[in-house]
Amino acid sequence: MGLRWKCSTLAKFVMFAGLSLVLSPQAFSAKEFSKKKVTLGSKTFVVEIAETPDQHERGLMFRSQMGEDEGMLFIFKNEETRFFWMKNTLIDLSIGYFDKSLKLIDVKEMKSGKGVPDSALPSYASAQPAKYALEMNKGWFDKNKIKIGSKLKIH
């Protein structure tokens, strides 16, 4: 009886915790990411850092807005062609891909995945191998006159 009660209670807890995550994706928003100051062009700003596989997968999902100079820097262990998609991403974004020397090699404009089935979401590939990716609000790179070849500095 005691073991059955414990298993049943544990199952209920796990089910409740899982349901809470499904119902409240905001619970994992900015809290799980550290922040760092970066400089790109004449702009210095603070970004969230995604450096683990779980953080890479989570990214900016479920965010309904972002401040003008806020974003997320994805740091990978190696340099290779990168592919991003907008699953569960509610806002349009611009992504800048950077090589291992932190030089901007590509910028893509990415459309929100809101209301789009996963199977219909486009993939946004880097034009060359990249070690870093910086997601900002749509149009941020153009607005701030950030050109290919610009260097990113992580403080």
Image (cartoon, rainbow, N blue to C red):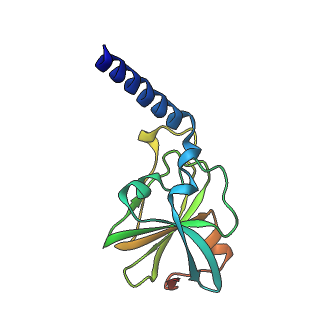
Question: Which residue is pictured at 45% across the width and 33% down the height?
Answer: 18
Across and down, in percent, residue 9 comes to 40, 23
Question: Which residue is pictured at 58% across the width and 45% down the height?
Answer: 26
User: Foreground residue, 54 or 71?
Assistant: 54
Residue 152 visible = yes
Residue 29, relative to residue 98: is it above or below?
Answer: above
Across and down, in percent, residue 61 comes to 53, 50
Q: Quadrant of residue 72?
A: bottom right
Q: Residue furthest top?
A: 1
Labels in figure, total: 0
Left or right of residue 144, residue 73 in this image: left
Across and down, in percent, residue 38 comes to 56, 79
User: Foreground residue, 122 or 95?
Assistant: 95
Residue 26, relative to residue 129: is it above or below?
Answer: above
Question: Which residue is pictured at 33% across the width and 23% down the height?
Answer: 7
Q: Quadrant of residue 120?
A: top left
